[in-house]
Amino acid sequence: MRRPPDGANRESRDLRRSVAERKGPGKPGSATSSLDELVEEVNRQILSDMRRFYSPQVVERLHDPRNPGPMREANGHARITGPCGDTMEIWLRIDERRVARATFMTNGCGPTIACGSMATELATGRSTDEAATVEQQDILDALGGLPEASRHCALLAASALKGAVLDYLQRGRATGENEG
Ligand code: FES
């Protein structure tokens, strides 16, 4: 696979902003509609570029990440910053030693979002032991692979997931709740 464009999401945002700035504020009538068409065209182009670099599973999650955002009722949580400087947070709601719900947040690039999304999807419904053994390769496999330069994003997501399970177990050990 060829190297992906850096921060495809950021690029998309920057392109849309620069197009909007070049055109100025929207006006009623044809100027607004031609701006809309231009933005649509830019979006189409970005999407087609993404499809050249990423699997359908990744592209789908770039547009519609599953389980995004913090979770108030979580009883397991981890926040990990990778060597690249990106941070991944995962929240887990575990009932009877099974992951009832998992959510994530990241400030990372597109592939990091796809990996966080997939980590929460793989964790949901699993026992704590199973969730703690979701590895980088499991996330990569479920996403249909990532370009070499983005494979570490899956490691960040897997590490955050393990950290969240560990946090749950440690909280339980402190209160005696998760014994047995
Ligand atoms: S680029 Fe930093 S985790 Fe993906």
Image (tube, rainbow, N blue to C red):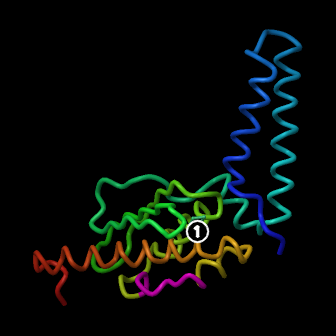
Image vertical order of residue 58 relative to residue 44, above or below? below
Q: Residue furthest bottom?
A: 180
Q: Residue furthest left?
A: 175
Residue at image position (63%, 53%) is 64
Mark 1 Cβ inside 8 Å of ligand 1: yes
In this picture, residue 22 sits left or right of residue 127: right
Image vertical order of residue 5 relative to residue 38, above or below? below
Can you give x and y, in whole percent of width and height, for residue 138 in the image?
Answer: 59, 83
Q: Is residue 25 magenta?
A: no
Magenta residues (range): 130-137
Residue at image position (71%, 32%) is 17
Residue at image position (70%, 59%) is 60
Q: Principal SS element in the magenta part?
A: helix
In this picture, residue 5 sits left or right of residue 154: right
Q: Quadrant of ligand 1?
A: bottom right
Q: Is residue 132 magenta?
A: yes
Can you give x and y, in whole percent of width and height, for residue 159 in the image?
Answer: 45, 77
Residue under circle 1? 115
Q: Quadrant of the N terminus?
A: bottom right
Image vertical order of residue 42 relative to residue 59, above or below? above
